[in-house]
Image (cartoon, helix red, strand yellow):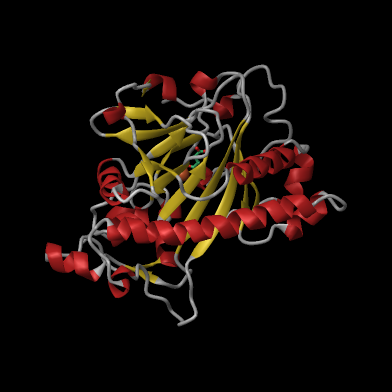
Amino acid sequence: MNPTMKLQTQTFNNVPTLPDSYVWSTTPSESPCLHSIDEKQVPPVVDIGDPSAFSLVRDACEKWGVFQAINHGIPLSLFQETEFEARRLFSLPTEQKQLFARLPEGFTGYGLVRISRNFPKLMWSECFGMIGSPVEHASQLWPQDHANFCEVMEQFQVEMKTLCEKLVAVMLRSLGLTNEQDTKWFEPKNESDRAKCFLQLNSYPVCPDPDRAMGLAPHTDSSLFTLLYQGGINGLQVYDDGVGWVDVQPVEGALVVNVGDLMHIVSNGRFKSVLHRVVVNNTRHRISTAFFYLPPWDAKVSPLKKLVEFDHLPMYRQVTWKEYVETKSKDLSKALDSIRI
Ligand SMILES: O=C(O)CCC(=O)C(=O)O
Ligand SMILES: [Fe+2]
């Protein structure tokens, strides 16, 4: 594990040069990104309220593992309020944010992104994770002034979860699965188990030397899929085998839908788990909100029966979510291979 998991006080504030621990040997500037104007070379923007959405979603998930969803029903104002509250949180002094530091194995609280432990260099980012109400942490931070933060974060999670439920149906229906029984994508341990969500606010402060730094190293999300609101500032890039790194240009009000490892498994390999990274810049502090859609901890996940019947062979063995997370935290790139049949 990286010995410097804990963020250093003052790391991001007014440092004139990039500290050595943040200098990456393979940097985004050495594998430049395509700023394409050819719409075939960028992940598509899909109006998910349109009847033609199904085939567009399927094509995007097969080719890219990512698309930008518009007309999803969540008002822009809720994204703006969430971003405003996130900025309020990240602008606090580091000592104060450290009061609710995330434990190395934990999900909630403040700190480095979980994948930091898998890389020798530090990333130019910080995050705050929440599952449900953040009141426990927020009330310590702002004893008199946490109500709005909590209200906005709770409302955001409720609306995003509803949207995730709708989107999973769209994605699986796009594969021809219309019967409810055929689209059960996890096997619960208990009857009452429901899908789970995890909200992570990400902050990428202004960086003195963005060409040698990394906001978030290349990774795939472990989730079924992730909904990402990236505000108006560029930074997210996805990898395409034929093209290389491609910018996902922010579209006002759109949500980036990232296919994760679990959807790749559930779809028996049809949908691609998208490799993505974040680059930083030297002028603007970027904030993003990532909403991960997940199974319950002890639930089992495997390729959907109908798809396996069609393919005659499952591509992956069954795995519990807990087992998958533990395998992936040991080695990001080998987790999928380790359950491949
Ligand atoms: O900030 C972004 O655009 C991407 C964030 C991300 O990939 C993540 O939180 O897993
Ligand atoms: Fe991610």
How many tags in the picture?
0
- Residue visible at 61% across and 52% down in the picture: 129
- Residue visible at 30% across and 60% down in the picture: 172
Picture quarter containing residue 30? top left
Q: Nearer the viewer, residue 308 or 74?
A: 74
Seen as rendered, the residue at the extreme bottom is 191
Q: Provide residue 17's location: percent of width, then percent of height.
A: 63, 18
Picture quarter containing residue 36? top left
Q: Provide residue 171's location: percent of width, then percent of height.
A: 33, 56
Q: Nearer the viewer, residue 268 or 230?
A: 230
Q: Is residue 86 visible?
A: yes
Q: Provide residue 74's location: percent of width, then percent of height.
A: 54, 49
Picture quarter containing residue 112? top right
- Residue visible at 68% across and 30% down in the picture: 11
- Residue visible at 31% across and 51% down in the picture: 51
Quarter in which the C terminus is drawn? bottom left
Seen as rendered, the residue at the extreme right is 144
Q: Nearer the viewer, residue 49 or 228?
A: 49
Q: Is residue 269 left or right of residue 288?
A: left
Q: Provide residue 297's location: percent of width, then percent of height.
A: 48, 69
Q: Is residue 338 visible?
A: no
Q: Is residue 63 left or right of residue 225?
A: left
Q: Is residue 234 left or right of residue 313?
A: right
